[in-house]
Image: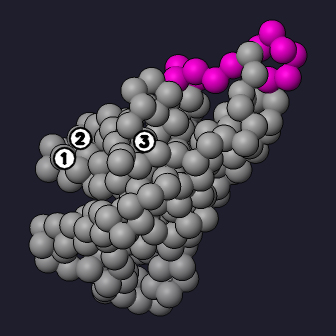
């Protein structure tokens, strides 16, 4: 029997009921695009704020970029999470619970997705992500490396939360439109937004890797517990290893 989602204990009402708007794939997809728009804060930082500290000593400017970007992403995520979790907004499926049945197979799928995402990156770049990042900081700015590394972790953590929001809202849109909850619809939406943006900003190779990683993160979400904290932890560990 195919996996199925747990029943929603509070089914959506139509907008005519006066309680909350009717659920629709389009509304979830638009909300996912709002989540993707949160990533745009980094572009504002690059264009408007990074020039202000361009003359700072090595490592300081980069650390400031990470700090300000992380703060903006965290703020945007909190605002969007509050909107999505407001029962009057009509997004009950965004974090509606995990699939039922086939727990062993789903756990194996999550582990396989994480191992592939981490392993492929390690093979391509010949390093573990955080080890390589700290090594470069230690060479370029040894006196500020520990503090800068802490800000880098905050940067990755806030990015992970935005990624999870896109996954959750995109997954709900796909399930409402096409069914098949085990399919990583959220990963498809993430690949078409965050992944494609990497092609435009970092080139084809980095972009294609980001798109593939987005699909794997989508598998982790669609097969997993579908909660902000647990999914963010799993995706975050996969993201930084």
- The alpha-carbon separation of the residues under discs 3 and 2 comes to 28 Å
**Residue 37 drawn at (x, y percent):** 52, 35
Q: Is residue 140 above or below residue 56?
A: below
Residue occupying image coordinates x 84% and y 14%? 17
Q: Is residue 35 above or below residue 110?
A: above
Task: Residue 165: say if magenta.
Answer: no
Q: Secondary structure at mark 2?
A: helix
Task: Give the class, few, some or many, for how many residues have Cα within 10 Å of label 1's Cα (few <14, many ≥20).
Answer: some
Q: Is residue 154 above or below residue 186?
A: below
The residue lying toward the viewer, choosing from 175 and 141, is 175
Query: Which comes sooner in the sequence, label 3 or label 2?
Result: 3
Residue occupying image coordinates x 46% and y 45%? 4
Query: Which comes sooner in the sequence, label 2 or label 1?
Result: 2
User: Disc number at residue 144?
Assistant: none
Which residue range is magenta in the image? 15-27
Is there a contact, CB below 8 Å, between mark 2 and mark 1? yes
User: Disc number at residue 199?
Assistant: 2
| Residue pointed to by mark 1 | 208
**Residue 14 drawn at (x, y percent):** 74, 16
Q: Secondary structure at mark 3?
A: loop
Front tag of 2 and 1: 1
**Residue 89 drawn at (x, y percent):** 75, 29
The residue lying toward the viewer, choosing from 80 and 50, is 80
Task: Give the class, few, some or many, for how many residues have Cα within 10 Å of label 3's Cα (few <14, many ≥20).
Answer: many
Task: Give the class, few, some or many, for how many residues have Cα within 10 Å of label 2's Cα (few <14, many ≥20).
Answer: some
Residue 13 in sight here: yes
User: Disc number at residue 181?
Assistant: 3
């Amino acid at each position: 029997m195919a996996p199925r989602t747990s029943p929603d204990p509070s089914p959506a009402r139509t907008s005519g009921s006066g309680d909350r708007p009717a659920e629709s794939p389009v509304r979830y997809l638009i909300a996912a695009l709002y989540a993707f728009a949160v990533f745009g804060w980094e572009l504002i930082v690059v264009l408007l704020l990074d020039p202000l500290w361009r003359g700072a000593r090595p490592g300081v400017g980069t650390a400031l970029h990470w700090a300000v970007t992380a703060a903006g992403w965290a703020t945007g995520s909190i605002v969007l999470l509050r909107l999505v979790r407001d029962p009057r907004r009509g997004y009950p499926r965004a974090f509606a619970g995990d699939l039922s049945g086939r727990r062993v197979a789903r756990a194996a799928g999550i582990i396989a997705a994480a191992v592939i995402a981490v392993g492929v990156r390690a093979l391509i770049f010949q390093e573990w992500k955080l080890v390589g990042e700290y090594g470069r900081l230690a060479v370029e700015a040894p006196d500020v490396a520990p503090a800068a590394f802490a800000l880098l972790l905050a940067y990755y953590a806030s990015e992970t939360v935005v990624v999870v929001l896109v996954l959750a809202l995109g997954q709900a849109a796909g399930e409402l439109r096409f069914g098949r909850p085990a399919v990583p619809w959220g990963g498809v939406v993430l690949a078409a937004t965050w992944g494609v943006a990497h092609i435009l900003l970092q080139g084809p190779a980095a972009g294609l890797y980001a798109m593939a990683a987005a699909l794997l993160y989508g598998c982790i979400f669609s097969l997993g517990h579908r909660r902000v904290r647990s999914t963010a932890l799993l995706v975050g560990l996969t993201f930084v290893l």
